[in-house]
Amino acid sequence: LVGMFIFLGFLAVGLLYAYKKGVLEWT
C-alpha cells in the first residue's frame, strides 16, 4: 500500500513536470 502511494506520487510529479514542460514547448 505504501509503495503504491509512493509510486502514484512519483507518477503525479512526473506528469506535472511533463505537463509544464509541454506547455512551455507549446507556447
Image: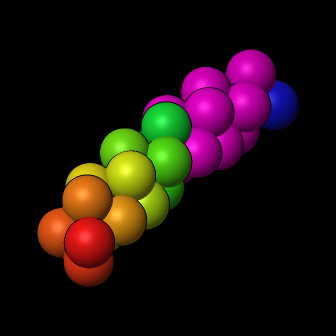
Q: Quadrant of the C terminus?
A: bottom left
Q: Nearer the viewer, residue 26 or 6?
A: 26
Q: Position of residue 6 (x, y in %)?
A: 61, 27
Q: Which residues are magenta?
A: 2-12
Does residue 8 appear to the left or right of 25 in the view shown?
A: right
Q: Position of residue 22 (x, y in %)?
A: 30, 68
Does residue 12 appear to the left or right of 10 in the view shown?
A: right
Whether residue 20 is visible here, answered yes or no, is yes
Q: Nearer the viewer, residue 13 or 19?
A: 19
Report if residue 24 lies within the magenta region: no
Q: Residue furthest bottom?
A: 26
Q: Residue furthest top?
A: 2
What number of labels is visible?
A: 0
> Residue 23 sits in which quadrant?
bottom left
Residue under the image location 81 percent in, 31 percent down: 1
Q: Is residue 17 above or below residue 10?
A: below
Query: What secondary structure prevails in the magenta region?
Result: helix
Report if residue 11 lies within the magenta region: yes
